[in-house]
Amino acid sequence: MKRVMLALSLTFGVGGASAADVSECMTIKDEIVRLFCYDRAAGRGSAASPSEVAPAPLSTSPPPTGTAPSPEPRPAPVAASPERVESRISGVFSGWTQGTRFQLENGQTWEVITVARVAAGRQDSPKVVIARDLIGQYQIAVDGVKQRAVVRRVDATP
């Protein structure tokens, strides 16, 4: 809450909205009315009321008999990757090149995006650790291999 208030006060500036104005806007449920409130508090926009600038409501007539309104299809959400993953590679590992995909025993799939070729001795289901580095990229470390590769998660399962 404090971050929101700070961000809004920085956005609206010293001569803009008071904390009371912004707090009042934050309690409004209707998006158009809330936006109008923020614009008014910031001294922006016209003096028109939200009802004067709001779009006309959509038709409220029921759909024809026997049909149901079809909702807009939404893409499936992709689960956020954790900061660190420890698992094993499913199957045999012998190295990687750019584009190599690793299926892990935990069900996740990761793809190498580093432009490099690493040849390693053949290993069955080696342990791997995938962790974020300082700039937010994921790197894979495979037991017994000194090099690391930058990877990205390519599956959509949690």
Image (cartoon, grey):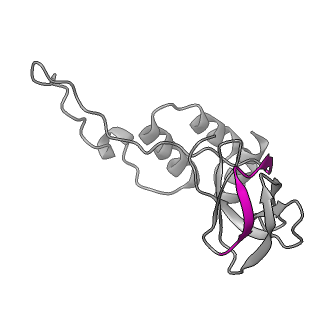
Residue at 83% across, 62% down: 141
The C terminus, quarter of image: top right
Q: Measuring from the top left, give residue 142's x and y in whole percent.
A: 83, 61
Residue 144 part of the magenta-drawn span: no
Q: How many marks?
A: 0
Splitting the image into 4 quarters, where does residue 131 fall?
bottom right
Residue 2 seen in the current view:
yes
The residue depicted at 59 percent of the width and 31 percent of the height is: 27
Q: Find residue 58 and report its horizontal and vertical position in percent.
A: 22, 35
| Residue at x-position 34% and y-position 41% | 73
State which quadrant residue 151 falls in: bottom right
Is residue 85 covered in magenta?
yes
Q: Residue 30: x and y, percent?
A: 45, 33
Q: Is residue 15 visible?
A: no
Which residue is the extreme one toward the top? 65
Residue visible at 65% across and 71% down in the picture: 113
**Residue 23 drawn at (x, y percent):** 65, 37
Side (left or right) of 67 relative to 39 = left
Nearest to the observer: residue 124 or residue 101:
124
Position of the N terminus by quadrant: top right
What secondary structure prevails in the magenta region?
Answer: strand
Asked whether 4 or 113 is in front, the reply is: 113
Q: Which residues are magenta?
A: 83-97
Q: Is residue 86 left or right of residue 53?
A: right
